[in-house]
Every structure is written in structure tokens, then in C-alpha cells.
Image (cartoon, helix red, strand yellow):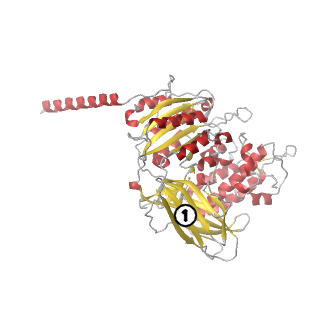
Amino acid sequence: MKKIIFILFISIVTLLNGMSKRADINTTDDWEYNSTQIFEETLNSPPMVGSVRSRAMAPKAFAPAPKKIGMAVGGAKDTNNFKANIENGYLPKIDSITYEGQFYNHYFDTGLGSKECKELFCPSYSTAKRLNPFSKAQEYFLSVGLNSGIDIKDFKRKKLNLVVVLDISGSMGASFNSYYYDKTGKKVEIEEKTQKTKMQIATESIVAMLSHLKDDDRVGIVLFDNKAYRAKPLRMVLLSNKKAIRDHILALKEQGGTNWSAGYQEGLKLFDEVKLTKDYENRIVFLTDAMPNSGELRKDRLFGLAKEASKKGIHTTFIGVGVDFNNDLVEYVSKTRGANYFSVHSSKEFKKLLDKEFDYMVTPLVYDLTLKLDSKKYKIDAVYGSPDAKLATGEIMKVNTLFPSSNENGETKGGIILLKLKKVADGNSDIKLKLSYTDINGKPFSNSQDVTFKPKNQYYDNSGIRKAILISDFVTIMKNWIIDARAGCNDRVKWVMEDYVTLMKRCMIFPPKRPIYPTIKTWERKSCKLKVSEGYIKLFQTFKRYFVKEMSELKDDSLKLELNILNTLLKQKPQEFDKKKSSDDWQFIQK
């Protein structure tokens, strides 16, 4: 008996050795970039890919498991850069906080109720009336809930042709929480809160991302400074030596200048090496800490190239690293088909996000979503959470892309778009809504529905629309504060004193409607120290009281995210008005 066991043991060992040798033969260290420096830090291997679900709030006890996935708009998927700037003592940039990005920090009741969704996409509509907390004017809101009939257990992403394009320029060696250069070339020094560089955070994030790839996915890597380098060809994961590639990535060091377009163009070249089929999702993940400007919108430059690539079925995920990443063009990214944007706050937090949502972030499901409003009584006044809305006619709302999203206890992460309507005639009547979209294969769909406002002065159809209104209030106030604060930081803007009442009226204006808005991107690249004027201190105190009251009514602890930011701003020493410099940050006169 012992002899039989011994023979069996020898046979198993021999088999395992053979499998190991066979694996070594079939995998290749296909790294081509010449880097000899070794980065010694190691990472724990992330868990296997699965349909993991997350929630900002703890789920209710004994709640039934979710059955369907949700949906959320493309574009900005977080507001980490906004939060990181405040935490590190800087005024954020205007586009570091977006409505869709802030919505994606939360889960919403989409208003679907007991209705069953059996289609790829099922919109649901909710209405609300309220008195504005500052102006006391009556306001009308309509929300679009983003639902899907796809069962979570049935959701499966396509195979991936994934090309990672990484910025290795000299600025990547700077600390994550400092501006590398001001507009004048002056380096800004602040108290260090982390020892990690942007390069370390970026490479660790890439390693975490690549761990979610499957054997039949393909991955390629491009690096760029002032030139572009093919670091790894686009090959099947099964055929690559994963450990060797991982070590090469972690060993990367920063050098040289920055040429975003060269990096992106080199990334596109890798797709020429494979046959693009409908079985694969083709995606470039572009990581940079830099500050691309409006020149990159040209057809032959970074964002122009991304838009052209999307027409060929090659989509882009932009990942901003560091507090000084330029968010000015996030709106443009949001308007590019199949594109989305994330900002890395820390490699640890980004790894958590990937563990839960990697399959979602690389899988667009709905394109060219258009909502047309037909009513003689109401017009669209503002849209929150739809960066590509066309408000010129007051009738059309557009979204380029919807991605799958987590669903917990019947609520969807970021699963809502909010419309503020303007009443243009007396009386009340049905609002006819016609929605159209295409799936990823270009097949068109449409549906129509009527909604009516209730004859009450104040009401909310559900907690989802009420929460969306509150969060949109927060974003609107933050954006108006940033406009005024950064204008005060810009010596080309002239200022005079205004009273608190005027400030209260202005803080709730939809930011794109402010006359100063089109000029912001010409002067906000410069870093500015975090300052809050006395007027905004008073305004934040007033809004905080309203916010806490609404948070209590909603019984939603996830709103502590916004409350904590308000508390941080309220702790700032009020900025004193200097008559000589005339630069108090809330005193702009509208023409």
C-alpha cells in the first residue's frame, strides 16, 4: 500500500513539473521598453474578477439581493480631484466637480417602483416641486431614472483589446498632493501628506487594473514623455509572463517632457496589429498628471484623436493622477462616445474601485441617448448629470454613452439625470417625453411616455429625485464659489463690493449661464491657495443648515461626503477684502 502511495506521489510531482515547464514555454516576457531600474515595492494580488457590488451606505438588514444591473452616464465618474485639492489647501478647478461625477458617488431610487424592466434600457420618470432655499421661488424638477433589464448574473463584458498609455514625464516624479508647476513655472510647496509620487500611484494602479484581465483578453502598453515608446505589444494575456510584466511596470521611472499626442498615436498603432471584431471591446486607458490645454482639441492632438478613434470603435478611459491634473476638458471627454474619466485619489482606493467595477467601466451599453420634451407649459431650464445636453431649444437632452452600474437594494449608483423645468405658461398639462437611443450594435430603440406635475406646491415623488436635487444644489454652489474664488485669484478680473443678498441670488445660478463662465478656462490653470471669503462663509453656513435638514429627512448617511466638504470649507479663515488689490473672491459684477 505504501509503495502504491509513493508511486502516486511521484506521478503527481512529475505532472506538476511538466505543467510548470509548459507554462514557462507558452508565456513570454514581451516587454520592449528598456528600463533597468528596479522598483522594490510589491503589491498584494487583487481578488478574482466577479460582479462585486458596492454601496456608499451599508445595505439594510435582510434586504433581498439585487437582480438587475443599473446604468449611469459616461464622462466623469468621480469628483476625487475636487476633494483632493481642498484637502491639500488649493482652490479646485471648475470642472473638477461635475454633476454626473457627484451623482456617481451615490445610490438613487430611480423611480421604477414595482414596474419590471425587460429591455436593455428602461427610463423611469419622477417629478418634484419645491421652494428654492435661497430665493424662495417655486421650482419644477423632472428626473430620468436609468434602469436596465439585464440580470446581474447574466452580465458579462466583452473580451478586451486593452492598450494602456502611461505618462512617464518628469512631473510624474512629484508628490501626488502638490502642483508641479504654476503657469509662471514656479513650483508650489505644501506640507507633504504622502511619500508616494504620482508615478508610484500610477504604476500600482495599472498593476491592479491588469490583474482583472482574463486569459483571452489582449493587453498592450505604451509609454511617453516628449517621445512615445512601445513597451509591450498587444498580445493575449495567456501568452504573457504576468509577473515579469508586473515587475517591469513597477520599475518605471519618470523622465523628460510631455507629448500626449505622441503617446496616444502610438497607442492607436498597437490596434493595427490585431483584427478588430465585434467580439472585442477596444479601449485605450490613458494615464497622465499633466495639464493638456485647448490646443489638444485639434483633430491631430490628444482629445481630437480620441474623438476620431471613437468613430472607429476604439474608446478611451482617461485617468487623471495628482491634484494638478487639468479637469478643464472633462466636459469634452464626456461628449466623446464611449469615453469616461476617473481621477486617482490613491492607488489603494483605485484598486477598491477596480475590484468592484472594472467590468462596468470598460463596457458601454447605450449610445446616443436623446430625450425630447414636448410641452406648451414647460421648457428645459437646466440639466444636471448630462454634460452633453443641448439647452438652446429648451426641448432636447442628450447623453452620448450609458455604462452599466451597481445596483443595491433597488437603488442604482449614479443612476439618475435631473432636469430643472421652467414654467412658461399658466395651467397644468401633460408633458410628453420621447426617448430614443441605440445599442452597441447600432440598433435603434425608442419609447414615449407622459408625465404630469401634481397640484401641490411642494412634493417629491420619491427619495431619489429629492436626493438628486440636494446634490445638484451642492454642486451648483461649489461651482459658483470656484468661479468667484478663482476669479479673485486672477489679476485680470476687476472687482467691486457686493452685498450678501446679491451673493445668495448668484450662488444658485446654473454655472454655464453666468456671463463669466466662457472666459474661465483662459485663466484657471494657475494654482490658487484655498480661500473662502466672508460672504461665502455665511452662505455655506446657511446652506449647511438646509443640507443637514434634508439629509435628516432622507435618512441617508452617504450625504456626509458633501457635509464633510462643507465643514472643511467653513473651517477656513475668512478671506479679508483688500481695497488696494480689489480681489475679494465673490464680488464680480455681472454685465
Q: Give the residue furthest to the top.
A: 36
Residue at point 73%, 47% (across, down): 520
Residue 145 placement (x, y as % from top left): 53, 62
- In the displayed structure, 258 sits above or below 282; it is above
Return the residue nearer the eye: 71 or 456.
71
Residue 403 placement (x, y as % from top left): 50, 52
Disc 1 marks a residue whose amino acid type is Leu
Residue 380 placement (x, y as % from top left): 65, 64
Question: How many residues crowd mark 1 within 10 Å: few (<14), some (14–19), many (20+)?
Answer: many
Quadrant placement of the N terminus: top left
Taking the image as drawn, is residue 196 in sight? no
Residue position marked by numbered label 1 in the rendering: 435
Residue 386 placement (x, y as % from top left): 60, 56
Using residue 464 as the reference point, say whether residue 2 is left or right of it: left
Return the residue nearer the eye: 110 or 134.
110
Using residue 248 as the reference point, say whether residue 19 is left or right of it: left
What kind of element bears circle 1?
strand
Q: Quadrant of residue 295?
A: top right
How many marks overall? Answer: 1
